[in-house]
């Protein structure tokens, strides 16, 4: 007789019960994805670091080459180092906002599924 009775999840009638249920589900989901989160964070730090370092170094290298082959009163090294750093920071900002947006959308989807 117990096989015939399908247990449905209880839907709380109060807003407090709903909030507690959503937070509990989010906590359980976070506990399942702990290793992914740690590796994801390390990977993101590496991505941000390289996305800033590579354009900065390329700008400095190009500036050194220009200073050696076309000596003028201006320092191409300094100008292109700053330009490379700016491009790298914009690139890192782009990646971080893209991942933040994806995480927020995933969280909103999960919250909608839990309600």
Image (cartoon, rainbow, N blue to C red):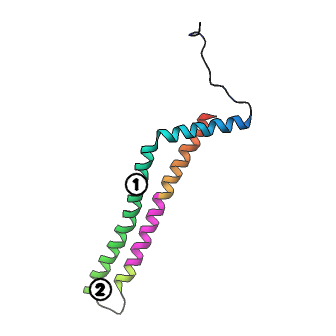
Q: Residue furthest bottom?
A: 73
Front disc: 2 or 1 = 1
> How far across and how far down the image is residue 109, in percent?
57, 40
Disc assigned to residue 42: 1
- Residue 83 falls within the magenta-colored stretch: yes
Relative height, residue 20 to residue 66 (above, below): above
Q: Residue furthest right?
A: 14
Residue 12 figure quarter: top right
- Quick one: quadrant of the C terminus? top right
| Membership of 75 in magenta stretch | no
Q: Residue at x 46, y 66 (%)?
A: 90
Q: Residues within 10 Å of mark 1 (few under 14, many from 20)?
A: few
Dot 1: what SS?
A: helix
Tell me which secondary structure the magenta stretch mostly adopts: helix
Q: Secondary structure at mark 2?
A: helix
Chain part drawn in magenta: 81-95
Residue 65, image x, y percentages: 27, 81
Q: Position of residue 74 (x, y in %)?
A: 37, 89
Query: From what the image shows, is residue 47 above or below residue 21?
Result: below
Please give the name of the residue rendered at 59% of the width and 6% of the height, measured from the top-left corner.
1
Q: Report the residue marked by disc 2.
A: 67
Query: Does residue 28 sit above or below 4 in this rendering?
Result: below
Q: Give 54 or 17, whichever is nearer the viewer.
A: 17
Residue sitting nearer the eye, 89 or 71:
89
- Whole-percent x and y of residue 71? 29, 90
């Amino acid at each position: 007789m117990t096989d015939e009775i399908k247990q449905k999840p209880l839907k709380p009638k109060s807003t407090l019960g709903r909030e507690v249920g959503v937070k509990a589900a989010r906590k359980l989901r976070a506990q399942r994805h702990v290793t992914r989160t740690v590796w994801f964070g390390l990977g993101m730090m590496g991505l941000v670091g390289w996305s800033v370092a590579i354009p900065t170094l390329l700008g400095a290298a190009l500036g050194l080459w220009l200073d050696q082959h076309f000596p003028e009163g201006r320092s191409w090294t300094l100008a292109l180092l700053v330009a490379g750093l700016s491009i790298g920071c914009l690139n890192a900002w782009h990646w971080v906002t893209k991942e933040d947006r994806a995480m927020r959308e995933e969280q909103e989807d999960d919250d909608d599924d839990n309600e």
